[in-house]
Amino acid sequence: MKKIFIKTFGCQMNEYDSNRIFDTVKKIGFEKTDVLEETDCYLLNTCHIRDKAKEKVYHDIGRIKKSFRSKKKPFVIIAGCVAQAENEEMLKREPYIDLVIGPQAYHKINSRIEEYFEKQKKLEETDFDAEAKFNYLNQIKNSSSKVSSFLTIQEGCDKFCHFCVVPYTRGPEYSRSYNEIIAEAKNLSFNGVKEITLLGQNVNAYNNDNYRLSDLILEIEKIPEIKRIRYTTSHPRDMTDDLIEVYGISKKLMPLVHLPVQSGSDKVLKLMNRKHSISDYIKTYERLKKLNSKIEFSSDFIIAYPGEEEKDFNETFELIKNIKFINSFSFIFSPRPGTAASNLKLIDKGISKERLEKVQKQLFEHQILMNKSLENQEIDVLVENKTEENNKFFGRSEYMTSVIFDGNDEDVGKVIKVKINNSNQNTLFGEKVRKSEQKVA
Ligand code: SAM
Ligand code: SF4
């Protein structure tokens, strides 16, 4: 047995990919290790979405070199979106790297590793071949057994928002076969998984033989062991009628809608090439709220996009106050090489920081208020595991908020009632409600 150490940067899809890479390399005799010093193979799954992504990778390799200074060097693989964007340049710049492999070429990882050991030749593999990748991976069982697991249904993007590197690093939009996804969901439930988050860079653009995301949700819902369904990340333009209507029918789809808006200004949305307007967005919000009043929204915001004036920023701020988003992400615009916005004139750093702070203060306030409103209430929690400290248990509310509470080992994997006693911005604290104490609805 050879050992592999996998480090993952970035989004949930990278996390899913890292697990699937491990399922794959197991076939050629690798086992996972969490002890860096004992590894034979170091795999870094990289993210290119913001900031000094490339430099972070070289910095990380520098650390590995140091750790292995007096030992045999591990076989070093760079995977993910930086690998795709930089390709053979990485092998030239850093001879410590042995294999560079992009996200749509993971089906070739075993043959490339074996080839390297036969010929000692460094390799770069960055073709876009999502179909071949999924055809290959469909034959390998997803071994994830976490209470809450990811399942990729769609990859890539054809929308080309001007700030975003995804269409270049993940390639064109591709939807996996409907039947294969259902088979993988059943297999996950067999492994003990209770919550599935369907993943895609444009997850609600999913379309395979006219099966849409709504069909997948309603079919997965039929698996008795699966208690909760989520999906991410979606685009406002693809919130189609069928998907909206599912919120009125589904018993297992969670009431948190993560729908990135990026900006509250139509002018900025146009500059970003987002192809949706604020009035469309608000209409979607209102329709969903009407169908199910429990629904709350979370979002992604890009602050200080080139051309964002004070007036535009104020529109973003107003939108945040109106919709009262919870659990959102906000970042200052970060120019990405190769994208349409890469060379635009940046907004002054001080102003950008000030705007970000103002937005985050407002977003956090909503989060704190939302959590406070749950104090003294009994809420449904899916229990994920026991915490390392204090012998407490960890789970999540329907809105993905972390819940720490006193419970029992046998509750792991179950949805139970927890009475919330306390809260802060990110966490709810409480105790399990015994069956005999549960309020009658
Ligand atoms: N497909 C989703 C959508 O259409 O909104 C977003 C997926 S993108 C991988 C995740 C988030 O990263 C975006 O919603 C955006 O807020 C952020 N992001 C992407 N490029 C960025 C950039 N150049 N600078 C700052 N944030 C960026
Ligand atoms: Fe990037 Fe999303 Fe725009 Fe596609 S739709 S380019 S993934 S932000």
Image (cartoon, rainbow, N blue to C red):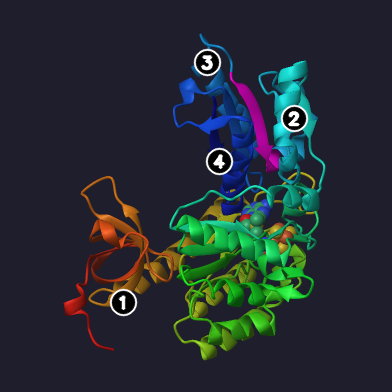
The nearer-to-camera label among 2 and 1 is 2
Circle 1 crowding by C-alpha within 10 Å: few under 14, some 14–19, many from 20: few
Q: Nearer the viewer, mark 2 or mark 3?
A: 2
According to the picture, the residue beneath numbered tag 2 turns out to be 112
Region of the chain picked out in magenta, as a range: 74-82
Percent x, y of residue 256: 49, 73
On screen, 68 above or below 412? above
Amino acid on which the number 1 mark rests in the picture:
Ser
Local secondary structure at mark 3: loop
Residue labelled with disc 3: 68
- Residue 23 image position (x, y, % from top left): 59, 42
- Circles 2, 3 touching at the beta carbon (< 8 Å): no
How much space separates mark 4 and mark 1, taking CA atoms? 35 Å
Give the alpha-carbon distance from disc 2 to disc 1, as whole Å: 54 Å
**Residue positioned 29% across, 62% down in the render:** 411
SS for callout 1: helix
Viewer-closest of 374 and 124 = 124
Asked which quadrant contains residue 208, the reply is bottom right
Residue located beneath label 4 in the image: 8
